[in-house]
């Protein structure tokens, strides 16, 4: 079974029943692929769902969601290799501003040998070497 990273937006849509991407996110998260979550994705998810007024889950609900994701999927963490990959990637692709966060997600996966990444925002990862994008909008 091939390993794949889940981007932050998948977790967000999975917990937002009003999202038009809710069911598609749930379908992906329950599909027979080996989903891995970079720790960065969990931190970003928490920041997004607790940020008022855009989306504000109560703290206990947000923490329960994090605990559920951690219980369901392996969490991978940054390490020396991911840092090296990130800064090389930054030089090659001029990752600046908010793109650095996407680069970090990709670099964590690459450091752990995971080259596929599922997302609803494929353009965020466009041009990043070594990552195969699975566009859930398709």
Image (cartoon, helix red, strand yellow):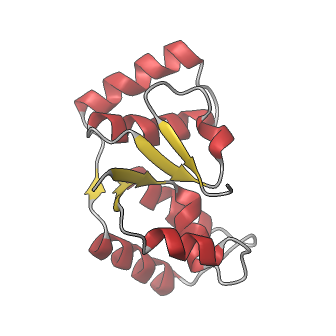
Q: Which residue is drawn at 36% across and 62% down?
A: 33
Q: Please indicate, yes or no, whether residue 35 appears anywhere in the rendered image.
A: yes
Position of residue 42 relative to residue 26, above or below, is: above
Instruction: Tell me which residue sits at (64%, 32%) in the image.
Output: 97
The mark total stands at: 0
Q: Is residue 50 visible?
A: no
Q: Quadrant of the C terminus?
A: bottom right
5 or 134, nearer to the observer: 134
Name of the residue lying farthest toward the top: 92
Percent from the top left, x then y, of residue 24? Answer: 61, 71
Q: Position of 109 compared to 9: left or right?
A: left
Image location (x, y in percent) of residue 77: 28, 48
Residue at point 63%, 44% (across, down): 122
Q: Which residue is drawn at 44% across and 38% down?
A: 106
Q: Position of residue 111 (x, y in %)?
A: 28, 34
Q: Give the left or right position of residue 124, taking residue 79 as reference.
A: right
In the image, taking residue 29 as reference, residue 56 lies left or right, namely right
Q: What quarter of the picture does the N terminus occupy?
A: bottom left
Nearer-the-camera pick, 13 or 26: 26
């Amino acid at each position: 079974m091939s390993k794949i990273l889940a981007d932050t937006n998948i977790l967000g849509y999975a917990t937002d029943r009003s999202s038009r991407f809710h069911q598609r996110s749930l379908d992906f998260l329950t599909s027979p692929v080996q989903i891995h979550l970079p720790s960065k994705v969990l931190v970003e998810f928490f920041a997004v769902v607790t940020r008022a007024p855009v989306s504000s889950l109560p703290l206990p609900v947000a923490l329960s969601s994090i605990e559920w994701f951690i219980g369901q999927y392996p969490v991978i963490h940054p390490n020396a290799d991911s840092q090296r990959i990130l800064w090389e990637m930054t030089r090659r692709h001029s990752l600046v501003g908010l793109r650095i966060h996407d680069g970090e997600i990709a670099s964590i996966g690459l450091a752990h040998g995971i080259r596929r990444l599922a997302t609803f925002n494929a353009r965020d990862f466009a041009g990043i070497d070594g990552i195969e994008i699975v566009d859930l909008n398709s």
